[in-house]
Amino acid sequence: MRFDVVIRIALLALRRSLMRTCLTALGLIIGVAAVITIVSLGQGARATIEEEVEGAGTNLIIVSAGNWTSGGVRLGMGSSSTLTPEDADAIRALPGVAYVSPSVRSRQQLVTAGENWSANVEGVGADLPMIRSWPMLAGSFFGPGDVAGDEKVAVIGTIVRDALFEPHVNPVGRQVRIGIHPFTIVGVLAPKGQSSGGDDQDDAVFAPYTTVQKRLLGVDYLRTVHISAASAEQVTAVGAAVTDLLRVRHGIAPGDPDDFRVRTLEEMIAVRTRTTRTMTTLLSSIAAVSLLVGGIGVMNIMLVSVTERTREIGIRVAVGARGRDVRLQFLTEAVILSLTGGLLGIGLGYVLSQGVTQVLGWPTLTSLNASLLAFGFSAAIGIFFGWYPATKAAATEPIDALRFE
């Protein structure tokens, strides 16, 4: 029997019981749509985490000052004054280190000709834009010469710009007083939004760390050192090398605790990534159950169809149809039913994904691979659950079939 004839007969058979066919396909439609939607949510969450990692910094390693104890009172992480600019210079010479930015921070009052604003003033190195992957909106970031010369130059975020200057005014070249010292604004950083810790990254001023140390804080130590490894594969090795280097430089004996802390973004996001993966797997398993139920529905309708069409099967066999022809006929009907449900489910899944984004604001990312996987799974369901009814139809004896009422 020609395959085009098989397809035409299968479509006619499914159309004869249109309501039952639609209800059976509905189970597959819901299952496939659920798979597409859930995978889109999982991939959207993963893309959001990756975006946060890129926004925080490229291959970032953060070295923080450690605990300091005075009179039996432990003052907590960041209170130690043992982390120095010389440590940062030594770290820069380590293999696998691409960029280094020493850092100190202070909360200061900012004053211009007509406005004032309180913001975080961070003393950083000239490498910060490369470490944080942070482009400029206007002007430029200060250079190594400004850091070496303790120059009173500053780069501001967009929140600070909007608070201190009139709309549409380019603040580059303008003066701002930080504490009692006048600084020249040399650049405005592009908007970056909130960090994963909830801080508004645009509500900040960046100046050479040497200037902040000497003119604003009067200290010679650092709070943090931001490091960018040359590649993602080197982050762990560089972190270990930094730990070994600082233990030697700080004279820490074997077995004694560090007076600093080295952390990587991989450690910070590992729990979130695992949680997202676990939830995606759990929800996908639930959706797979829906597909399984839909497949059982396909098998049920095909078994009913075999019973209802017993006389038709007997007549076909009596006039020369072979068992494989009958098997192919019913298997084709099951596959058509499954593929149609799969296609409609993919369309519904795309609509639901966009609806979740629009209504709930959750990020979704629908991939072609997920759609192809769902479509292939639908075809597999048609073949798997259609095989038994098709085999049963092919095994029907012509005499018994013609006697069937």
Image: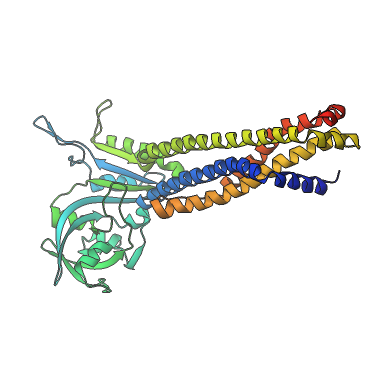
User: Could you tell me residue 109's position as x and y percent?
Assistant: 13, 60
Whether 122 is drawn above or below 3: the answer is: below
Residue 214 location, quadrant:
bottom left
In the displayed structure, does residue 174 sit left or right of residue 312?
left
Where in the figure is residue 342, as x and y percent of width and height? 62, 45
Where 385 sits versus 211, above or below?
Answer: above
> In the image, is 175 to the left or to the right of 228?
left
- Asked if residue 98 shows in the view, the reply is no
Q: Quadrant of residue 30?
A: top right
- Residue at x 17% of width, y 40% of height: 79
What is the quadrant of the C terminus in the image? Answer: top right
Residue at left offset 27%, top offset 68%: 186
Q: Position of residue 180 (x, y in %)?
A: 10, 63
Q: Residue at x 25, y 46 (%)?
A: 224
Placement of 258 over or under 95, stated as above or below: above
Judged from this view, the residue extending furthest toward the left is: 71
Compared across the picture, whether 312 is left or right of 193 comes to: right
Foreground pick, 83 / 184: 184
Residue placed at 27% from the left, 50% from the top? 102
| Nearer to the camera, 159 or 230 | 159
